[in-house]
Amino acid sequence: MSLFRQSRHPIVRWWWEMDRVSVITLLVIMLCGAVAVTTASVAVAKTYNVGAYYFALRQYVFLGVAAGLMVVLTGLKPVGVQRLGMILFGVAFVGLLLTFVLGVEVKGAKRWLEIAGQSVQPTEFLKPALIILTAMLLAHDEPQRRLQGFLVSIVLMAMVAIPVLLQPNFGMVLAMGTVWFAQVFMAGLPLLWLAPLVAGGLCVVVGSYMLLPHVRDRLERFVNPGASDTYQIDQASEAIMAGHLWGRGAGEGVVKNQLPDAHTDFIFAVVVEEFGILVGLMLMGLFLFLVLRGFSRVVEQDDRFVLLAAGGLLTLVSLHVCVNIGVALHLVPTTGMTLPFVSYGGSSTFAMALVFGLLLALLRKQGRRF
C-alpha cells in the first residue's frame, strides 16, 4: 500500500488527491439511479410509446458519460474552473436566448433545444456557470472591490432571470436566486445590503403569482389542495405510504403506471414504493452525507473563490434534493427540479456531472493539476 501511494502514475496520484469517500458515495447514488430508472422504464415507456427499456438504456449512457465528465473536470485548478465557468455561461446564455426562436414547446413552455436528436435545457448548465461567475465577483478581499462585484452580480442575476421568467420557468429563477443569495451571505456582506434582496425576491414571487397562470395554479393547489386537481401529488403520497418499511418489491410498484413523470419528478415515490421507506431514508442519507462532508471541507478553505464557488454548488445540490423529495412528500409546491443522478434526463444528469466535477476539483488536495 505504501509503494502504491508513493507511485507517480497519474491515475494513482489522482486517486490519492481526490476525496475518495465522496467519489464512492456518488457512484452508489448513480447505481441507485440506474436501478430506479430501470424499474420505472417499462411502465413509463407505454405512455410515450417507446421500447420497454428505452429510458433505462439511455440513462445508462447518460450516467456513463457523466462519470467520465466528472473525472475529467476533477483535474482543473481553480483558475481552470473560472475559465470553464465563463465559457459555459456564454454558451448556455446564448442557448437560453435561442429557446425563444428555436425552442421546443412542452406543456406551454419553451425551455428546450433539439440538438442531434437530444433535448437540451440550457438553463440546467446556466446554474453552475452562474455560481462560478458570482463566486468570482464576490471573492475580492478589498471591501470596495467586493461591493463592485456585488453590484455586477445583481445585474448578472437580473440578466439571466428575466429571459428565464419569460420562458416561463419560475422554479428555475427561484432556484438561481436562492443559491445567489446564499453566496452573497457566505461572502460576508453586511446584512443591511441583504434586506433589499429579500424584498426584491418577494416582489418577484408576488409578480409571478399575479402574471403567470401556471405559478398561481401550482401555489393554489399546494395551499388549498381540496379545491383543485392534485392527482399526481396524491398518487405519489399514496405510493410512499404503500411502500412501508420494505417496499412492494422491485417491479411491483403501481405509481409508475399512473404518473407520466414517474421517472423524473416523482422518482423518489417509485423508489420508496418498491424498495421501502428504509431505502428512501438511505438515499436521503447519502445525499445528506455528501453535502455535509462537502461543507466540512469548504469551511477549511483559505481561498475565498473556492469557498464561495464550492459553497454555492453544494447549496444547489441541497436545493435539488430537498425540492424533489419535498414535492413527492407534498411539502413544497410542484416544480420540475430533478433528484441528482436518480431522476431520468440527459440535461440534468450532465449538468449535475458538471456540478460535482467542479466541486471535486475545487476541494481536491493540492497536486499537479492543469
Image: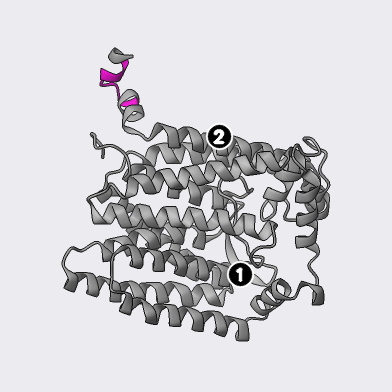
Q: Which amino acid does label 2 sit on?
A: Val
Q: Residue lying furthest front in this view? A: 245
Up/down of 262 relative to 286, above or below: below
Give the labeled residue for mark 2.
Answer: 28
Q: Return the residue nearer the eye: 294 or 135.
A: 294
Q: Return the residue nearer the eye: 361 or 219.
A: 219
Colour scheme of this structure image? one colour
Image quadrant assignment for residue 73: top left
> Would you say residue 234 is visible in this rendering?
yes
Q: Distance between the Cα atoms at labels 2 and 1?
A: 34 Å
Up/down of 251 relative to 257, above or below: above
Which numbered disc covers residue 110? 1
Q: Return the residue nearer the eye: 85 or 360.
A: 360
Q: Where, quadrant-wise, is the N terminus in this rendering?
A: top left
Magenta: main secondary structure:
helix
Q: Residue 312 at what x, y percent from top left?
A: 39, 58
Q: Residue 188 at what x, y percent from top left?
A: 28, 66
User: Could you tell me which residue is drawn at 22 percent across and 69 percent down?
Assistant: 146
